[in-house]
């Protein structure tokens, strides 16, 4: 399948954000910490969610999925095995997170290797060290990971070397059912982490958050099932905002909580974007004035998210002057700028930290981008989409470019955003999904 995008016109209209994949999938895993049913609402109709659903089913979890109403009921009492089969190998980032609930329940867990976007080394050493610190044993094999425990997991004090989202989730999953008190220091505090904490609390977990990235957990013996609404995808929200601003259109985005867009909104205003809050989860985005260049450094929350940099970079191609983006979270996240050169994107990638020195300094990694605008983008016959988050950036670039561009590799987009052509019906974007 391909997307045929004919660009060169302002894109206006209205679109609803999906529930965020980066919480929906974790909420599915959290549901396995109880043996009672949990219902999740506003789940996204995307490939990555299907992958997680299938993974859960493969160990015997009963799942009632109501696609029309975007809800899923997870019944973990039917789980039969702690061995997640290998066909899921390489599919997404969930296998390592499944270890904790399975370890609590069965005393052992076998999970396949991780997949996900190739945007850096994406090591799982923090997860492994956390499992060991809580008293578990874990070994990496050619096919994945095998974890065991000889007695109940015990609360511990664990300091994350970097505020990793996934490793903070692993620590939460380990600690809520561990014996005694746990403290996670240098924890991630992304909105999705706090949604997860809210969900775990509603299941009966005792979690206390403190200033300075510190979370204390008092373990309990059992958790109950719950009902949870999946919050709107702030990455998607920012992407639609960029589409409006970059094409000089006007888009109303529904289903997004403005507070989750944090610093994005300020950077957006600074480069010449405008927005108006229309209600508690609707925002109208537009271009306010000719776009100006800027300097941005990606960071962990509350900084400018690494997942916002791709659509923002494409928007900056329409600003008059030189912009700089310094990526500090993943070390290989600018490949898409090189691939977009044929459309007329003018970007130079360098291994220097053009900003605050990061842990990637002096390692010859591609961590800073210098974008020169304004570029008149022109359509090309075909471009392959290499990863999920670059996906919407490609759609935005094709929407700016004069003429028709075919996007291939669209499974990468659909894994995180669903069928974009179908979802863009309320927008004046000329996009078709073709065989
Ligand atoms: C989550 O990835 C998201 N994925 C990412 O979104 C997002 O970009 C990222 O958090 C940062 O916000 C999901 O939630 C599924 P990390 P995660 O652990 O948890 C290093 C998307 O497309 N690290 O916070 O995998 C790691 O290499 C994706 O939706 C270790 O070194 O990210 C990275 O440099 C793309 N060892 C940094 O920490 C570890 O054990 C942050 O990674 C764990 C992480």
Image: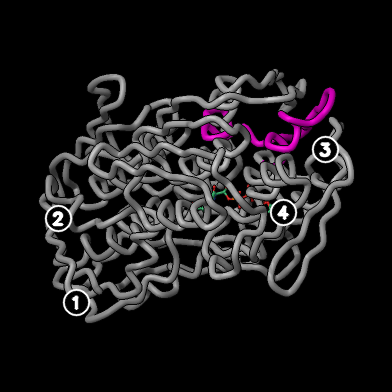
Closer-to-camera residue (122/108): 108
Colour option used: one colour
Specify few, some or many for label 3: CA neighbours under 10 Å numbering under 14, 14-19, or 20 or more.
some
Q: Position of residue 108 (x, y in %)?
A: 76, 51
Q: Position of residue 334 (x, y in %)?
A: 51, 65
Q: Earlier in the sequence, mark 2 or mark 4?
A: 4
Q: Considering the numbered disc 1 on the image, is that residue within a helix, a strand or a loop? A: loop
Q: Considering the numbered disc 2 on the image, is that residue within a helix, a strand or a loop? A: loop
Specify few, some or many for label 2: CA neighbours under 10 Å numbering under 14, 14-19, or 20 or more.
many
Q: Position of residue 46 (x, y in %)?
A: 35, 53
Circle 4 sits on which residue? 109
Circle 3 sits on which residue? 159
Separation of residues labelled 4 and 1 (CA atoms): 40 Å
For marks 2 and 4, give the one nearer the viewer. 4
Separation of residues labelled 1 and 3 (CA atoms): 49 Å
Q: Residue furthest bottom?
A: 381
Q: Residue at x 21, y 61 (%)?
A: 399
Specify few, some or many for label 1: CA neighbours under 10 Å numbering under 14, 14-19, or 20 or more.
few
Q: Is residue 216 in view?
A: no
Separation of residues labelled 3 and 4 (CA atoms): 24 Å
Circle 1 sits on which residue? 435
Q: Which residues are magenta?
A: 170-195
For marks 4 and 1, give the one nearer the viewer. 4
Label 2 lies in ligand 1 vicinity (Cβ under 8 Å): no
Circle 2 sits on which residue? 429
Q: Earlier in the sequence, mark 3 or mark 2?
A: 3
Q: Is residue 241 magenta?
A: no
């Amino acid at each position: 399948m391909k997307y045929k995008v004919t660009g060169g016109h302002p894109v206006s209209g209205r679109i609803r954000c999906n529930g965020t994949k980066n919480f929906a999938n974790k909420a599915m895993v959290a549901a396995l910490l109880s043996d009672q049913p949990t219902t999740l609402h506003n789940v996204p109709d995307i490939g990555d969610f299907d992958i997680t659903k299938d993974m859960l089913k493969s160990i015997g979890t009963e799942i009632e999925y109501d696609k029309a109403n975007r809800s899923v009921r997870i019944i973990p009492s039917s789980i039969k095995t702690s061995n997640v089969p290998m066909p899921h190998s390489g599919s997404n980032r969930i296998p390592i997170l499944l270890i904790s609930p399975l370890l609590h329940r069965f005393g052992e867990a076998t999970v396949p290797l991780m997949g996900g976007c190739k945007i850096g080394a994406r090591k799982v050493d923090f997860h492994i060290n956390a499992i060991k610190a809580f008293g578990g044993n874990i070994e990496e094999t050619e096919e994945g990971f095998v974890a065991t425990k000889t007695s109940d997991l015990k609360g511990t004090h664990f300091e994350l070397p970097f505020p990793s989202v996934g490793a903070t989730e692993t620590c939460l999953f380990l600690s809520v059912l561990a014996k005694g008190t746990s403290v996670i220091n240098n924890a991630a505090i992304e909105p999705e982490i706090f949604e997860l904490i809210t969900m775990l609390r509603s299941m009966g977990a005792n979690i206390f958050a403190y200033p300075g990235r510190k979370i204390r957990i008092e373990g309990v013996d059992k958790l109950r099932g719950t009902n949870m609404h999946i919050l709107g995808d702030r990455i998607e929200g920012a992407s639609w905002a960029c589409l409006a601003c970059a094409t000089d259109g006007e888009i109303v985005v529904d289903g997004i909580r403005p507070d989750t867009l944090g610093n994005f909104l300020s950077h957006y205003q600074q480069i010449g974007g405008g927005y108006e809050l229309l209600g508690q989860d609707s925002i109208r985005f537009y271009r306010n004035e000719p776009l100006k260049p800027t300097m941005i450094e990606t960071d962990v929350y509350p900084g400018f998210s690494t997942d916002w940099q791709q659509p923002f970079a494409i928007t900056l191609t329409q600003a008059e002057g030189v912009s700089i983006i310094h990526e500090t979270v993943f070390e290989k996240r600018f490949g898409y700028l090189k691939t977009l050169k044929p459309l007329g994107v003018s970007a130079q990638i360098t291994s220097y930290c053009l900003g605050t020195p990061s842990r990637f300094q002096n390692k010859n990694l591609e961590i800073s981008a210098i974008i020169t605008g304004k570029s008149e983008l022109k359509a090309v016959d075909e471009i392959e989409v290499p990863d999920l988050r670059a996906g919407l950036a490609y759609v935005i670039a094709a929407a700016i470019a004069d003429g028709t561009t075919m996007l291939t590799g669209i499974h990468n987009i659909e894994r995180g955003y669903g069928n974009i052509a179908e979802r863009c019906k309320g927008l004046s974007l000329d996009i078709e999904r073709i065989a």
